[in-house]
Image (spheres, rainbow, N blue to C red):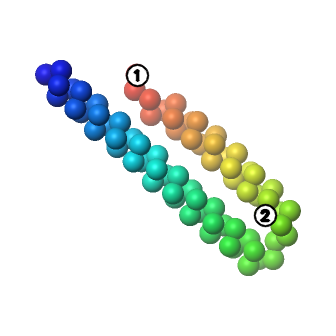
Amino acid sequence: MSKKIDAIEAKIAKLREQLKAEQAADRERDERELLRLARAAGCTRDLIRIAQQKATAAAKASVVKSGAETKPA
């Protein structure tokens, strides 16, 4: 029984890591798309930099918030 539990926990850990990697890739893709749209809209480099900083801060806050919610009890 203990081996089954260990195997399930290992699978869960692997899936969590996979999810984190997929979420990071999604964030990077979204960030690139927003940057492309900002440039197309004629935003200056300073405005783009400020927007990126805000997006990064929001993403970090989201990760911290979701990390606290997904941890096992």
- At x 41% / y 43%, what residue is drawn? 17
- At x 75% / y 52%, what residue is drawn? 53
**Distance from the alpha carbon under mark 1 to that under mark 2:** 40 Å
Query: In the picture shown, does residue 56 fall above or below 35?
Result: above
Q: Secondary structure at mark 1?
A: loop
Where is residue 72 drawn, in percent x and y? 40, 26
Q: How many marks?
A: 2
Where is residue 16 drawn, in percent x and y? 39, 41
Mark 2 crowdedness (10 Å alpha carbons): few <14, some 14-19, many ≥20:
some
Q: Secondary structure at mark 2?
A: helix
Tell me the residue that label 1 is attached to: 73
- At x 40% / y 22%, what residue is drawn? 73
Residue type at numbered disc 2: Ile
Between 64 and 32, the one lying in front of the other is: 32
Residue type at numbered disc 1: Ala
Image quadrant holding the N terminus, namely: top left
Q: Can you tell which mark lies on residue 48?
A: 2
Query: In the picture shown, does residue 7 fall above or below 20?
Result: above
Q: Is residue 44 left or right of residue 9?
A: right
Q: Nearer the viewer, mark 1 or mark 2?
A: 2
The quarter holding residue 22 reads: bottom left
Mark 1 crowdedness (10 Å alpha carbons): few <14, some 14-19, many ≥20:
few
Q: Are the residues tagged 1 and 2 within 8 Å (C-beta)? A: no
Between 46 and 72, the one lying in front of the other is: 46
Where is residue 32 drawn, in percent x and y? 63, 66
Which numbered disc flags the more N-terminal residue, 1 or 2? Answer: 2
- At x 81% / y 77%, what residue is drawn? 42
Query: In the picture shown, does residue 10 fall above or below 52?
Result: above
Q: Is residue 7 left or right of residue 69?
A: left
